[in-house]
Image (cartoon, coloured by chain):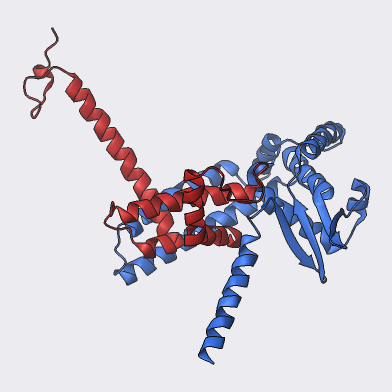
Chain colours: A red, B blue
Amino acid sequence: MLIEKEIRKLARSSYWQNLYRASKEIGTIHIFDNVSNLSGLQTLFLHWLSIYNSLYTDLVQREWKYLDEEVINNDCRCDAFLSWRNEYRIQELEKQKREEKVNKLNLKDKSNVTTYDVNLT
Amino acid sequence: MDNAKTLNESIETLSNNNFNTSIIIDNKLCFELDNKFYRVKMPNQSEQSFAEHKRNIIQLEYLKQEGCITKTQLIEDLKNKNIIDFNKQEKIRENLIQELKQLRFFLATKGSREIFKIEEYTTKINEIENLLKKMAIEMAIHLNPCLESRIEKFYIEYITFLCTEYQENNEWKRIWNTFEDFNKDNSSLCNRATSNMTWLMLNRG
C-alpha cells in the first residue's frame, strides 16, 4: 500500500517525531489542524508516530542488538523487528509470571524446585 | 551554480514533503482531475448520522429484493457450487501468516551487515505478503454481491456524495445536489472521489 508507505515515511521523519514528543509534553501543541473527528489516515499516522517513537527510544537506549537506523528506515525489516520484539516481550512477561509464582511459594531451596519442596503448612 | 542546484533540490524536497503532509495535516484529502481541484472531507456528526439513517433504510430495501443474500449464505453457496471454499482459503491464509511470522523472526535477528540474508528473507516475505493481498482481493470480489458488502458500498458512496467538494473562487462547494445526481454522474469523478473517501476513512466507517 503506497499510501501507508508514505504515512510511515512521514511518521519516522525527525520533524514529525519532534512534534509528537513536544505535543506529549506541551498540551497546547497540536499535531493536526483539526483536533477532533480524525480521519482514518490520521489515526493510522498517529499509530505509526507512536511506534517509531518507541523504536527511536529503544535505539537511543541501545536496548536491542539488532535494532539500528537501517531497520527503522526499512519497512519490511521494521515489521520483522516489531513482530520479533512483541514475541520476545510476551515470552519475557510469561517468564516473569512463572518466577513470581515460584517466589510466592514457601520453598526450602528455590534453585532446585520439585513438588516435594513445597511447604504446604 | 552548485548552490543553485542544492537550493533547487531543497525546494523540490520541501514541496514533495508538503504534498505528502497534505494527506494527514487535516481530515480532508485533495485531488486533481482534469485540471480542477476537488476534495473529500470527513463527515461531521450530522452528516454521519444522516448517512447511517440512509444506510438503515437501504438495508430494509435490499432485504425485500429478490436474490438478496447474506455473507454467510453466500459463503455456503460458493462452497456448494465448488467456486471457492472460504474455510480452505482461511486455512491457507493462516499457514501463510505462520510462515510469514517465521520469516520475520529470521529477518529480525539479522544484523545490517548480513546483506544477502536480509535480501533473501525480504524477497520471501514480499512474495507471501503479495499472495495474502491477492487472496484478500479475490475473497472480497466473491463477496461483492452479499448484503453486507452492498450496504458498506452504499454507505461509502453516500458519504462521498455528501462530502465531496470543488473549489470555486476560493470557496469549497458541494458537487452533487442529490444522491440521484451522484448516481447519474458517469464521469470518472465519482470513482476517484469514492476511492479517495475510502482511503480517507480507512476503517473508520
**Residue A46, percent from left and from top:** 54, 48
Q: Is residue A13 shown to the viewer in this render?
A: no
At 80% from the left and 65% from the top, the residue drawn is B37
Point out the image quarter for the N terminus of chain B.
bottom right
* Above or below: residue A81 compared with residue A37: below
Residue furthest bottom in the image: B1
* Above or below: residue B124 compared with residue A107: below
Q: Is residue A68 left or right of residue A34?
A: left
At 52% from the left and 57% from the top, the residue drawn is A16
Q: Is residue B41 left or right of residue B4?
A: right
Q: Nearer the viewer, residue B84 or A69?
A: A69
**Residue B173, percent from left and from top:** 87, 54
Q: How many marks?
A: 0
Q: Quadrant of residue B137?
A: bottom right
At 37% from the left and 45% from the top, the residue drawn is A86
Point out the image quarter for the C terminus of chain B.
top right
Q: Nearer the viewer, residue B58 or A82?
A: A82
Q: Is residue B131 shown to the viewer in this render?
A: yes
* Above or below: residue A90 compared with residue A39: above
**Residue B143, percent from left and from top:** 69, 45
Q: Quadrant of residue B103?
A: bottom left
Residue furthest top in the image: A121
Q: Is residue A60 left or right of residue B169?
A: left
**Residue A73, percent from left and from top:** 43, 64
